[in-house]
């Protein structure tokens, strides 16, 4: 970082100065203001003899020109030199500024550098030309977990802010994270998300602050509702925000934020103050962020700029919206003028901040990160959106919905195509987001990378760039991206994980071109427990290869097990109230219990007898006999079971034929039990009788296979198909 021959770019205008030796520095000092000199020295601090020579030069210059404009500069430089000469080469003054520009809910396809032909984002384009652009960057599918991962460097399974719950009251200390009950159609109790970031974690802001940084947070927080969990408690010296998140108190001033009281939906509390009437909050946040930068030039700063745009309630500047209302997307995918308007406002904010950094000659020595907290929203405010369907005249949101209908009809906010789905889902549309990182002199301008990265990497990357050590006891799951950014190496990790046990609960692993999704239970809209995609060939996740590639599924699934174990994920627990009613099982599995009930356990179903001769009946074995049946089962008592069938045209099960018995040995171990079934033709109904009358039988899998190797499988194990 302190190589004397480093090339320094001045002012962002393609003027390059080669600071080969001290002479050049001194020469430049006579023509440049103090900020530039400070920047140059911060960048490339002189040491030892060089510093002494420089000091001598300055002193002589000062005595020769006591009234010159350089007076201030020289004083500033002397202070800087004093630091360096005093033997503090790692002084805070050497460190780069950090800007984290986080857009809320901005999708992967929502800007021109990522391929949008509808939205207009010239400043994002400009940044892309100066930065490294990541094509395969991830966030969590919702806000709060991404934000918690950014500030902690940890996976959501470790910090346990797993859902967008940072606007809810904190759970009482010592309360179980698992809910007491769940509806009987849910197999599991899913642990609740933590509603705030653990105060014991050494946050990015705290670590930077201790290293001499000035730290400021502007905008959406969503990592805690009450004052004890506000940004100032996590290392931010300046904080401009209002609770509750997730949206802004209002997109337009007066924002109506109170200084005190308990935050609630109708009572926003925080530090945001009103501006002139009609001021747009995206602009106001930019004013505040720019002021913070201007006031922080004497030492390195960390600007944590977390925009409210482009999240609901989608306040927008009508003049822009009207322009986009006339525009058509050549791709035919994006057509919401409100979103286009909001993105233009965020883009203008980006432009203003970049301009000001350049004007202040700070752009050179600033690590600038542009990022989004989750995929684009593709569900809100459509005609199907249940949240808006009941909004009638008199409802506080009525006018906003009318406004939406006027401009956008029943369009959702955005469209992430070619990615599948969006915010709140584990598909790429929900978790793949834009990420661009600029650091002149360190990162090649206009570079791109397909490195698989995520919010866990922000913390170690920033500390690495700042030359600040990670707190010794703190576990960081992410890796510094500097080798990728500098194109000197690759990441060490083998796979990247997304833990999202909410909405449609699932966990995913990405390894190279492969992505495996593991659901904890079948969902009516997503019946497959495993989905395997090759993202290189199928970025839209259209072809589930899980059944074709069982080995790949097992290999990736083992990585998920390891991840769950290593990060201490709160794995879903069996729901004691779950009853495998005939109806629910018929919907998802086609197994109908008789004289028994089905209870879900981890990786199995348990069959509890409720009457004589319990069995599971199914019409789903559409294979031609003879068939081989395999059970993976266990039972403390064991016993005899049998399989019985009737084929097409048979009204009843024959009295003594078409039945085969099997033995299930007693014990704790899982047993594989096979039975050859001499079925003629295709069975209409198969009944699997289980020795569950007096003691439960657990089933991990039921498999039927024909002579050609075709199978019908029920697999209750979370591990392998
Ligand atoms: Ca968000």
Image (cartoon, rainbow, N blue to C red):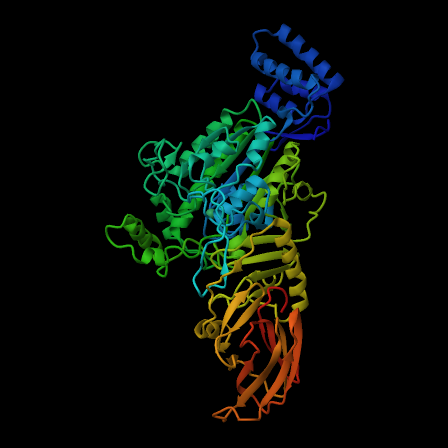
Whether residue 442 is visible to the viewer of this picture, yes or no, is: yes
Total marks drawn? 0
Between 706 and 110, the one nearer to me in the picture = 706
Side (left or right) of 234 relative to 381: right
Image height of 575 relative to 350, above or below: below
Between 495 and 592, the one nearer to me in the picture = 592
Q: Position of residue 120 (x, y in %)?
A: 46, 47
In the image, farthest residue toward the right: 49
Q: Position of residue 355 (x, y in %)?
A: 51, 33
In the image, farthest residue toward the left: 394
Between 217 and 699, the one nearer to me in the picture = 699
Rendered-image quadrant of the C terminus: bottom right
Q: Position of residue 683 (x, y in %)?
A: 55, 87
Quarter of the figure with residue 705: bottom right
Q: Residue at x 65, y 27 (%)?
A: 43
Q: Residue at x 59, y 23 (%)?
A: 36
Q: Position of residue 337 (x, y in %)?
A: 39, 51
Image height of 36 relative to 501, above or below: above
Whether residue 13 is visible to the viewer of this picture, yes or no, is: no
Rendered-image quadrant of the N terminus: top right
């Amino acid at each position: 970082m302190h190589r004397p021959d480093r090339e320094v770019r001045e002012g962002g205008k393609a003027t390059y100065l080669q600071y080969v030796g001290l002479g050049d520095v001194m020469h430049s000092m006579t023509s440049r203001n103090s900020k530039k000199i400070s920047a140059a020295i911060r960048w490339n601090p002189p040491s030892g003899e060089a510093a002494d020579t420089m000091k001598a030069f300055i002193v002589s210059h000062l005595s020769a020109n006591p009234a010159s404009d350089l007076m201030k500069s020289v004083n500033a430089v002397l202070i800087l030199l004093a630091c360096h000469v005093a033997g503090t080469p790692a002084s805070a003054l050497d460190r780069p500024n950090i800007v984290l520009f986080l857009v809320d809910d901005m999708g992967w396809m929502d800007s021109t550098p990522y391929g949008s032909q509808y939205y207009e984002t010239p400043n994002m384009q400009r940044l892309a030309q100066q930065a490294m652009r990541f094509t395969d960057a991830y966030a969590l599918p919702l806000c709060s977990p991404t934000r918690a991962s950014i500030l902690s460097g940890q996976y959501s399974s470790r910090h346990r802010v797993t859902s967008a719950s940072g606007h809810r009251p904190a759970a009482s200390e010592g309360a179980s994270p698992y809910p007491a009950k769940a509806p009987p159609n849910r197999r599991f109790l899913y642990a609740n998300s933590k509603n705030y970031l653990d105060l014991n974690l050494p946050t990015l802001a705290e670590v930077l602050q201790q290293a001499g940084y000035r730290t400021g947070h502007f905008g959406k927080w969503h990592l805690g509702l009450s004052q004890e969990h506000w940004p100032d408690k996590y290392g931010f010296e300046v904080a401009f925000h209002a609770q509750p998140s997730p949206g802004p108190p209002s997109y337009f001033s007066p924002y109506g934020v109170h200084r005190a009281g308990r935050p609630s939906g109708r009572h926003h509390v925080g530090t945001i103050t009103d501006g002139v009437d009609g001021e747009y909050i995206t602009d106001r946040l930019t004013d505040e962020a720019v002021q913070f930068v201007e006031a922080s030039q004497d030492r390195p700063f960390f600007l944590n700029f977390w925009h409210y745009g482009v999240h609901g309630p989608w306040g927008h500047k009508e003049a822009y919206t009207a322009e986009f209302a006339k525009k058509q997307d050549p791709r035919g995918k994006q057509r919401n003028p409100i979103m286009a308007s909001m993105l233009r406002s965020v883009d203008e904010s980006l432009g203003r901040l970049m301009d000001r950094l350049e004007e202040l000659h700070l752009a050179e020595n600033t690590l600038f990160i542009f990022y989004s907290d989750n995929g684009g929203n593709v569900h809100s405010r459509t005609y199907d959106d249940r949240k808006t369907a009941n909004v009638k005249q008199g409802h506080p949101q009525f006018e906003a919905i009318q406004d939406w209908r006027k401009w956008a009809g029943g369009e959702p906010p955005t469209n992430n195509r070619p990615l599948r789905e969006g915010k709140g889902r584990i598909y790429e549309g929900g978790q793949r987001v834009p990420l661009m990182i600029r650091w002149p002199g360190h990162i090649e301008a206009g570079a791109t990378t397909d490195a698989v990265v995520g919010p866990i990497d922000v913390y170690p990357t920033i500390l690495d760039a700042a030359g600040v050590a990670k707190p010794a006891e703190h576990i960081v799951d992410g890796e510094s991206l500097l080798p990728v950014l500098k194109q000197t190496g690759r990441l060490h990790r083998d796979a990247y994980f997304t833990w999202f046990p909410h909405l449609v609960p699932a966990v995913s692993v990405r390894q190279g071109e492969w992505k495996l999704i593991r659901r904890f239970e079948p969902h009516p809209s997503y019946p497959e427990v495993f989905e395997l995609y090759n993202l290189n060939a199928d970025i839209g996740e259209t072809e589930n290869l899980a059944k074709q590639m069982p080995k790949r599924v097992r290999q990736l699934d083992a990585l998920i097990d390891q991840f769950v174990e290593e990060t201490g994920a709160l794995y879903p627990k069996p729901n004691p109230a779950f009853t495998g009613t005939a109806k629910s099982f018929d919907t998802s599995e086609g197994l109908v219990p008789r004289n028994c009930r089905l209870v879900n356990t981890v990786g199995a179903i348990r069959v509890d007898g409720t009457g004589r001769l319990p069995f599971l009946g199914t019409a789903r074995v559409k294979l031609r006999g003879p068939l081989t049946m395999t059970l993976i089962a266990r039972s403390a008592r064991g016993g005899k079971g049998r399989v019985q069938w009737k084929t097409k045209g048979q009204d009843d099960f024959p009295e003594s034929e078409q039945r085969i018995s099997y033995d299930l040995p007693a014990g704790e171990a899982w047993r594989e039990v096979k039975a050859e079934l001499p079925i003629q033709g295709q069975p209409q109904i198969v009944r699997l009788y289980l020795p569950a009358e007096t003691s439960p039988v657990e089933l991990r899998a039921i498999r039927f296979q024909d002579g050609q190797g075709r199978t019908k499988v029920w697999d209750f194990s979370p591990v392998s198909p």
